[in-house]
Image (cartoon, rainbow, N blue to C red):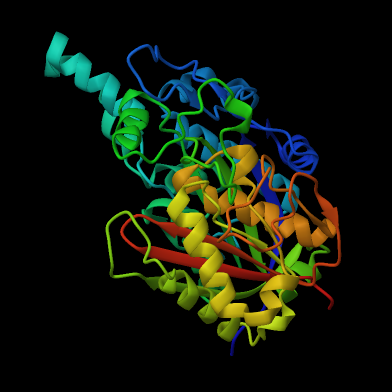
Amino acid sequence: MSRRVVVTGVGLVTPVGTGVEKAWKNICSGVSGVDHITRFDTDDFQVKIAAEVKDFQPKDFFEAKKAKHLDLFVQYGLAAAQEAVKDSGFSVTEENCERVGVITGCGMGGLPTIEKYHKVCLERGPKKITPFFIPMVIPNMPSGHISMEIGSKGPNLSLTTACAAGTHAVGEAYRNIQHGNCDIVVCGGAEAVICPLGVGGFSSMKALSTRNDDPASASRPFDKDRDGFVMSEGSGMLVLEELEHAIQRGATIYAEIAGYGLSSDAYHIAAPPEDGEGGRRAMKMALRDGGLAPEDIDYINAHGTSTPLNDRCETQAIKDVFGVHAEKLAISSTKSMTGHMLGAAGGIEAVFTALSIHEQFAPPTINLKEASPECDLDYVPNNGREMKISVALTNSFGFGGTNAVVAMKRYEG
């Protein structure tokens, strides 16, 4: 028997604020987190801007000794999970620990630490590599550390599906609860690769915006002058819970997970097909999984990367799925404010989608001065909107042609 699944906790570490209250307020107000890169000297780089997390203090979440042995993406993931678990009001005990899981997503792992110790190895020799190097960089360390910290002994997974990883993590957490493998799953994504190799690599692909003279307006999804995405970092974590379990303990319910879709383009390592048909199939699967009609959807938190190709193809996919109803949808890209957090994006945007339903508010797509001719839907331009949101989708598409879509709806008993 399929079980109902709800969101009972949320946590955020973002370039527009650490902590849900601060980050959500800034998202609703259209605040940009993009600025000039401070992590390294960008003199030789074509791209000099990114969305760095600015207010994160490791000491607020763990001891200095522990932080020293955690790559930044693990710190972000662990901090966001701490907030989400605290927000949920749930405690793992010896009696329930096997019914609690952790599923996280990550695109690239500890790239800054790899950079650092590659240099150490070359300059000082292999004996100077810290024994913590491997445990610092492997992509499953957020899920591992979260599990160890809260004491959960259920499923412990990490997904590395590029920019769809966070959404896949939420979807797979939903499935594990739905199918009875556990009652609660902490899930989401974490990423921190604003470093020379990360920025240089994406820059060499011509994927990044070079609007260095005006960072705050560089991420401009669906705008005719968009020129690439803005690298970002952070983490978004959610606590998903079986409905009756949540009700019995009086938990706050932000939203109900209504459906999950995933697909492959089988087309190109880094580009979607022109008609966005892989994303279209993932959206259709999410609707079918949730028993939803296209007309049921009020809002979409779009993948909306600010690249010429993605925004055009995602728009076409939405039109193909929703037909005439596409013109009635509110669609926004919160990446216009946060930048693109790669494997963490889906986790953060799942939090935003749950909050949009809970607060009945659609965040804006900022920097949308003039939409491209092929991007002609309602992208909630520049100002957020109070509106009825009964059902929403959150889309994520990644390199390798991997797509993930989660549908959420307002919980009504």
Describe residue 353's horizontal placement relative to residue 402 as left or right. Answer: right
Percent coordinates x, y for residue 41 in the rendering: 39, 11
Which residue sits at x=37%, y=23%? 46
Asked where in the image residue 331 lies, by quadrant, the reply is bottom right
264 or 346, which lies in front? 264
Q: Does 153 sit above or below residue 232?
A: below
Name the quadrant of the N terminus. bottom right
Q: Outermost residue toward the front? A: 373
Q: Position of residue 388 (x, y in %)?
A: 86, 67
Q: How many marks?
A: 0
Residue 345, horizontal then vertical, whole percent: 53, 48
> Can residue 132 be seen in this snapshot?
no
Give me the residue at 73% from left, 53% from top: 88
Q: Which quadrant, please, contains the C terminus?
A: bottom right
The residue depicted at 67 percent of the width and 78 percent of the height is 4
> Is 303 left or right of 254, judged from the image as shown?
left
Query: Is 106 displayed left or right of 86 in the figure?
Result: left
Note whether residue 38 is visible: yes
